[in-house]
Image (cartoon, rainbow, N blue to C red):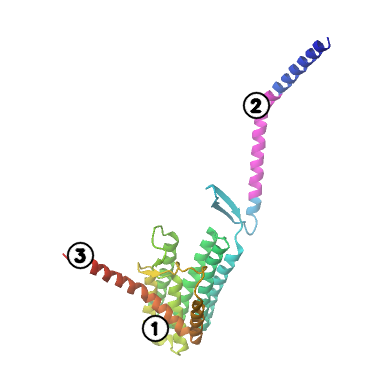
Amino acid sequence: MKNAAFSRVFLCLSAELNWLFACQIATLFSPAMLQGNAMTEHQNKDHDTEVEGAHALLPIDEHVEEVSGPDGRKVRHKGIYLLPNLFTTAALFTGFYAIVSAMDGDFARAAVAVFIAMVLDGLDGRVARLTNTQSAFGAEYDSLSDMVAFGVAPAVVVFSWALTDLGKVGWVFAFIYVAGAALRLARFNTHVGDDDKRYFTGLPSPSGAGLVAGMVWSLSDFGVAGNDISLLVGVLTALGGLLMVSNFRYYSFKDLDFKGRVPFFVILVVVLVFAVISSDPSRILWAIFVGYTISGPVMSLWRWRQRSKSAPLE
């Protein structure tokens, strides 16, 4: 009797629970409930839109960058890396300082600022790779900084020093250099290919800046007035701009291993190099950049002659 009564109670409870579950399912999928869910989602979207609109009213918006994750999926990150961008900002500042110094007539200080920008430009990328803080923002920021420090600044410096007396011809020489630097950077940023990483195609923009700024620094130290040799200076400046967009190959020094162990005498050679440069920095640095600028056409001519000798005679 007890088992029969318990069975009847259990069956009644099961039927009641099934009926309640069916009613709940019907309520969830009813048109009214579906409409309510749609309205809730719409309200959430409106709220997100209002939040984005509120952020848009801020004076400085947050930087969001999309990168590929380890599994290949796109991941969004907010903010930027501070350390490498500090070096890039410092290089940008020294380029701007070189322009201001040239406008004030202090050409030696302006040229030194360009060389300091070269050192800072060489550090930001290496710091980013060592600390694993590379980003698309940093790459674009570095390119714009290079345009100011190695494109606009050397052109303004050399124009203020020697090319003003040439009038329109002078600023044409300076503009050829600026345009060459801009095209060189654009080609470097968008170049796709399997070229040998040991070589650059065209004179790198820092080396072009070293050629022009070193000329101003060394000759002004000699007491040479730029206006006395303005035509020669203009030709050399335009030549530097044309070499930046040429197809001459220049050694990139990227295959040098700075992390591995080296013989002890290497550090002695480095100390000797620093001592030699410090004895007369303006002239020695300019000589180094002149030699590097000439190396591209010379090596191309040498390769052409080697191919000509190895070609079969008809």
Calculate the distance from the C-alpha at mark 2 to the C-alpha at mark 3.
Answer: 86 Å
Q: Which quarter shows the C terminus?
A: bottom left
Q: Tell me which amino acid carries mark 3.
A: Pro
Check if mark 2's residue and mark 3's residue have beta carbons within 8 Å. Answer: no
Q: Quadrant of residue 283?
A: bottom left
**Residue 84, x across and y down, in percent:** 57, 65
Q: Amino acid at mark 1?
A: Ser
Q: Residue at x 72, y 19 (%)?
A: 18
Q: Is residue 197 visible?
A: yes
The answer to whether any part of residue 238 appears in the image is no
Tell me the residue at 68%/24% (across/down): 25
Tell me residue 98's x, y (percent): 52, 77
- Position above or below: 99 against 226: above
For mark 1, does the 10 Å Cα neighbourhood hold few (<14), some (14 to 19), or many (20 or more) residues? many
Q: How many marks?
A: 3
Q: Which residues are magenta?
A: 24-52
Give neighbour class at mark 2: few <14, some 14-19, many 20+ (Cα, 10 Å).
few
Q: Mark 2 vs mark 3: which is more N-terminal?
A: 2
Q: Secondary structure at mark 1?
A: helix
Residue pointed to by mark 2 = 31
* Amino acid at dot 2: Pro
Magenta stretch holds residue 33: yes
Circle 1 residue:
230
Q: Which residue is mark 3?
A: 312
Where is residue 194 shown, x and y percent of the image?
39, 58
Dot label at residue 284:
none
